[in-house]
Image (cartoon, rainbow, N blue to C red):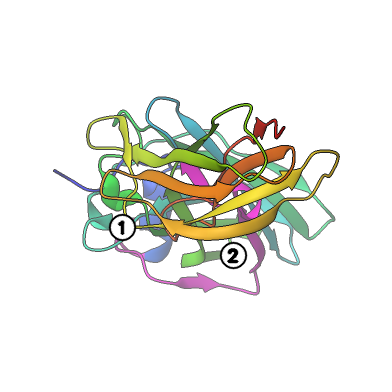
Amino acid sequence: MRALTRLALLGTSVALVAGAAGGTAAQAADGGSGNITIDKVVVNGGKPVVVGTTNVVSAKVSVTASDDSGIEETTYISAFGPRPNYDQIWYEDGEITCVKVSATTSTCTGTLTFDPQGGSAINGNNAAATWRLSTLVSAQDNDYIHRDAATTFKVQRNSKLTVNASPEPVKKGKAITVTGKLSRANWEDSLYHGYTNQPVKLQFRKKGSSTYTTVKTIKSNSTGNLKTTVTASTDGYFRYSFAGTATTPAVSAAGDFVDVQ
């Protein structure tokens, strides 16, 4: 199965890059003419793009550039996943909006679309990785600048975490069993599967407090399940908390209240 793949290309067209940089969009290297500069590139507000199993996820992209003649109202933007499959990306035209910041500077924004059902940008779990954003900006005087990796950003598989503390109520000094499960999106079958052998913190928040403290750290088992015991001492909330990995975002379960009598 192709691991990566469809992306939204926002802006003029592949031909713009081919004509300006002397090759196809996928092959174009860094280049440019004149004194045009790319000042800032932001994908998804600087946060990873987190994709689950069903919903299409849109990530806003902004490119700020400057030239003494002013920026033309067109910008090419594309995203490439990890090697070796990034050269298999499909291209799609879309809309882009450029707003003048000053006479010489504009910020152009567009949207990358990620579909876990395979329609756009996601066709396998290998897409959970660091992506690079390629862009070309044109100026009013025909200056241009192309950057093959103007910035990078992460695409991650959405995570879920549950918790259940029992028995409820419980006598002070007795054992409380805290179970749960850490799972994450699988883009191969559109289901959530247990995330195995991962460190997860068991945390407790005393009734009336707003702060969780870590009680212990355990690891998820071969199916992503979590289980441990603690001694009942006072009323409060138990939760599991996962710090995340490069491919999977951090997540904390909602607290489960235990009445200690």
- Magenta highlight on residue 25: yes
- Residue furthest out toward the left: 1
Viewer-closest of 213 and 96? 213
Answer left or right for 93 relative to 231: left
Viewer-closest of 162 and 35? 162
Answer left or right for 7 relative to 66: left
Quadrant in the rendering for residue 83:
bottom left
Q: Mark 2 points at which residue?
A: 143
Q: In this view, does 202 lie above or below 122?
A: below
The answer to whether one can see residue 159 in this image is no
Give the numbered dot on residue 26. 1
Crowd tier of the residue under label 1, counting other residues whose Cα lies within 10 Å: few below 14, some 14–19, many 20 or above: some
Q: What residue type is labelled 2?
A: Asp
Task: Residue 181 in the image: state x and y as whole percent.
Answer: 41, 39
Task: Residue 141 in the image: state x and y as whole percent.
Answer: 65, 60
Which residue lies at the image location 54% right of the left edge and 41% below the top edge? 176
Marks 2 and 1, the one that precedes in the sequence = 1
Q: What residue type is labelled 1?
A: Ala
- Magenta highlight on residue 151: no
Q: In this view, does 152 lie above or below 118?
A: below
Task: Select label 2 or label 1 by which is in front.
Answer: 1
